[in-house]
Structures are given as C-alpha cells and as structure tokens.
Image: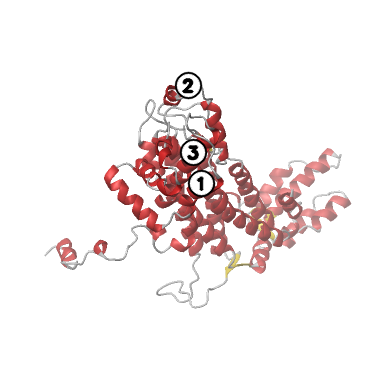
C-alpha cells in the first residue's frame, strides 16, 4: 500500500459532523479562541450591529422627515412618539435579530426586511398612518452607507483607537524609562554608532502617533440622495421641499460628514483613506514586533515567564516571544484585508455594482485582527525586562564604532589648522575595517594623532556607551 493510501486509511470514516452540533462552533479564530480580545467590535461591525444601525438610520430618517414637515400630511412627532421609535433601536436584541432574519427569509432582501421590521411596530405607537414614511425616498444604499459609517465610526473611536493609544502610551513609557540606556546600533545588521534603547522606542512611538493623529481626523462621509444620487424620487414626490438641506442636516445629525455628490453609492473614498492609515499603523507596529523579537534573540530584552506557561512542548528552558509572533501574523492578515478593501471600495461599475456589499462584510475581520495584534504586543511588552548588562557588554566589545567620532574630530581639527590631520577616514578605515579594536588600542591610536589637547581629552574620555550624542533628550519630542 502506498504512503498516501496509508495516510487516508488513518483518517476515521463515519465521523460526526461538527457543523451539525447544537452549539455554534466558530469557523474562524476571531469568533473562537480569540473572541475575548475582539468582542467589543461585535457591537459595531457584526451583522447584528449592522442591522441594528440600519434600524437606527431608518428610525432617525422617519423622525427627521416628520419633524421637518417636508411632506404634506406630516407634522413634528411628540416626545413620546420619538422615544417610542428610538426604543426600537435601544431595545434591539437577539430576539430582534431572530425576528429580522425571519422577515428576510421572505423578502430575500436585508434592507427591505428592516423596513418591514419597523413598520410592524408603528401601530403600537399610533403611527400606523405614517407607515409609507419608512424608507421614504431611499434606495438600500442610502441606509447601508450611513449604517456602515455609523458602525465604523463607533468601532474606530470606541474600540480601535483606545487600544492603539494604550499601546503607544506603553511604548512611550518604555522609551522614557530607557531613555539613557545606551545600546549598540546595527545598521545593515552590523555594529554602528550607538544610540539609546529609549530613543529607538521613541522613534516607533512618534511614528505610530502620527498615524493615530491622521485616523483621529477621519471624515466619515454619508449620503441619502436616492437611486442614482439625483433626488429624482424626492422632487417627483414633493418638489417644493429643499431636499439637499434635508439630506445634509440628516447626515450631519448622525455625526457624519455629508457627501453632496454621489452615484447610487457613497463613493467609499473615506473608507479607503482610513484603511490605508490603519494599515500603515499596522506595518509600523509589525516593524516593532520584528525588532523586539530580534532584540530578545540577542539578549537585549529578557522575557518574564508566565507562571505555569509552557514555552516548548519538548524544551523546558524556552520562553518563546509568541505574543510578537502572533501579532506579526495578525497584522499581516489585517493588512491583507485592509488593502483589499481600500482597493475594491473605490471602484464601482457605472452607477452601482455589488462588489462593495460583499467586501464590507469583512471590515470587522480586518479590524479584529488588528485589535488582536495590538493586544498581543501590549501584553508582550508588559513582560519584558531590559538586560542593561547585556547591552553594556555588547558596547564594550565594539570599540571600533568610535572610528566615526575620531575621524570627524580629525576633520574638525584640520579645518581649525591643526597639522597632521590628513586622510582621517582612510586612517581609521585601516585601523578598524574588519578588525576588532579594544579600548586600549583605540586610546593608543588617539594619543598618536597629534590632536589639540582639548580634542584629545574629549576622545580619550569617550567610550562606546557614552557615544550617544543627545539620544536621551530626543525622547522629549514625544511630549510635544
């Protein structure tokens, strides 16, 4: 029997179907093992949340039209009627989800199901006569674009940004704590001019903060202007109303920015811009993960073991940097989706196609993997100790990095008129390139150069650990 046949034989036949279980079994990790980390997003970017927001938009449109008295036969609603309508949204729960799903099985249309769901509740509120006002003048995309904008705005402001800010604050705190801890730089992976650990962390915090500033300023756009963005049905029905003003004030009442020029769909450009900024944040964070992973590998950071945790199933000594590795994978998955969303959503055939509908159902997944990664990095950073002795030892074994300082001092001396300062770069290259130079040899070289007393004194006092320029004070830029 062949190896492949043996492999097949080892798979049990007649297995029970897990999908047939009475309990819901998650297909993906965000709804399974990682659900606890991403659960807050359910209130904004799940299918149920989208439907609740659709109900919310329809209810607010109903109230807005009534209160504007734009249509003959309408008048401002009473406080009790408005509260009753809004209770449809605030009381939206799992039973509502089930009821709405049952209606959709008949309509085969999700937004039409929302219209019927609301219409079924108007009689109890004494508003049965106004049932035609539900979804008045709207195409489905009028409701959908606003519902997505409301949900995405909530997810960004209430979930993603707080998590991202907490992470950046942690990185900034580590930068401050390690601002004066000298560290060997490794440009191209080779020993280079020293820095401080704090300054390097500050660079990342500064980069991430710029992206958060951009994301915080996002304009969440919306429209409610009919089937092709012309208000044709509105003006055919009630030509004397100022429908642009009605639409603008309604969109703005939802906390969104009005988009005055659209096709059937709101163009989604703001979403593409947001996802590009989020993806850039993710990529900078990914860079931090790979750097920290590498610093752990060479001993610059020590990981604090989690009591009872297993690092390796066979090697008891290991404490693996799994939080950073997990974050890398989730950031890559998030970016794959964010990039796809950004590329897909800005295009539409003529006035409408449905590619955006299918794409947008994955927004929550993209956000989820990013939030999961942020939580992992935050947890990983919280279990790191700076191994200052290892950093100091690494510096002490790389005195050749002072070659830059010596040749620059020689250049300055030559400009000042000191004799014998010819070819400083070449002389230091001969001394250090491909060679390890200890402190004694470097000092011997310096004393033989014929420098001025001041310059020679500065260089003799210099060590790799002290050759950090103003790295520690650069961390203060995070406070500005």
Residue at left offset 39%, top offset 54% = 96
Residue at left offset 43%, top offset 51% = 365
Of the numbered discs 1 and 2, the one sitting upstream in the chain is 1
Can the viewer see residue 331 in this picture? no
Q: How many marks?
A: 3
In the rendered structure, the answer to whether residue 480 lies left or right of residue 154 reads right
Can the viewer see residue 40 in this picture? yes
**Label ID, residue 81:** 1
Q: Nearer the viewer, residue 202 or 420?
A: 202
Dot 1, crowdedness within 10 Å: few (<14), some or many (≥20)? some
Of the numbered discs 1 and 3, the one sitting upstream in the chain is 3
Report the Cα–Cα distance between label 1 and label 2.
27 Å
**Label ID, residue 239:** 2
Dot 2, crowdedness within 10 Å: few (<14), some or many (≥20)? few
In the rendered structure, the answer to whether residue 15 lies left or right of residue 439 reads left
> Which residue, given by chain and number where applicable, does mark 3 sit on?
61
Q: Name the residue at the left extreme.
A: 1
Q: Which color scheme is applied?
A: secondary structure
Measured along the vertical axis of the image, is residue 343 above or below residue 443? above
In the rendered structure, the answer to whether residue 358 lies left or right of residue 302 reads left
């Amino acid at each position: 029997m062949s190896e492949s046949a043996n492999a097949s034989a080892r798979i049990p036949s007649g297995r029970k179907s897990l999908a047939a279980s009475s309990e819901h079994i998650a297909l993906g990790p965000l709804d399974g093992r990682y659900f606890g980390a991403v659960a807050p997003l359910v209130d904004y970017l799940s299918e149920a949340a989208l439907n609740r927001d659709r109900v919310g938009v329809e209810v607010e449109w109903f109230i807005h039209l009534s209160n504007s008295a734009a249509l003959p036969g309408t008048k401002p609603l009473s406080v009790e009627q408005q509260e009753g309508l809004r209770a449809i949204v605030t009381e939206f729960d799992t039973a509502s989800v089930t009821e709405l799903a049952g209606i959709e099985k008949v309509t085969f249309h999700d937004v039409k199901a929302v219209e019927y769901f609301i219409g079924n509740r108007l009689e109890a509120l004494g508003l049965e006569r106004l049932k035609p006002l539900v979804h008045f003048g709207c195409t489905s995309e009028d409701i959908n674009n606003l519902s997505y904008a409301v949900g995405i705005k909530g997810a960004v402001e209430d979930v993603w940004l707080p998590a991202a800010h907490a992470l950046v604050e942690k990185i900034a705190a580590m930068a401050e704590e390690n601002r004066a801890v000298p560290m060997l730089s490794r440009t191209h992976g080779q020993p280079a001019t020293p820095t401080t650990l704090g300054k390097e962390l500050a660079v990342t915090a500064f980069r991430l903060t710029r992206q958060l500033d951009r994301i915080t300023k996002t304009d969440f756009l919306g429209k409610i202007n009919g089937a092709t963005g012309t208000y044709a049905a509105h003006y055919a029905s009630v030509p004397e109303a100022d429908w642009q003003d009605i639409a603008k004030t309604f969109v703005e009442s939802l906390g969104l920015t009005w988009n005055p020029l659209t096709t059937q769909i709101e163009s989604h450009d703001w979403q593409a811009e947001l996802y590009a900024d989020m993806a850039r944040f993710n990529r900078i964070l990914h860079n931090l993960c790979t750097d920290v992973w590498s610093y752990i590998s060479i001993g610059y950071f020590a990981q604090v073991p989690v009591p009872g945790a297993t690092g390796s199933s066979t090697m008891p000594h290991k404490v693996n940097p799994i939080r950073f590795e997990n974050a890398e994978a989730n950031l890559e998955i998030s970016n794959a989706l964010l990039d796809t969303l950004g590329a897909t959503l800005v295009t539409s055939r003529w006035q409408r196609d449905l590619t955006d509908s299918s794409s947008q159902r994955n927004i929550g997944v993209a956000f989820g993997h990013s939030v999961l990664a942020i939580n992992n990095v935050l947890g990983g950073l919280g279990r790191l100790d700076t191994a200052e002795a290892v950093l100091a030892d690494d510096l002490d074994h790389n005195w050749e990095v002072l070659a830059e300082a010596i040749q620059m001092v020689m250049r300055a001396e030559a400009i000042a008129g000191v004799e014998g300062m010819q070819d400083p770069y070449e002389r230091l290259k001969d001394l250090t390139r491909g060679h390890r130079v200890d402190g004694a040899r470097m000092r011997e070289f310096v004393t033989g150069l014929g420098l001025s007393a001041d310059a020679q004194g500065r260089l003799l006092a210099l060590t790799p650990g002290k050759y950090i320029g103003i790295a520690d004070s650069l961390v203060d830029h995070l406070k500005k």
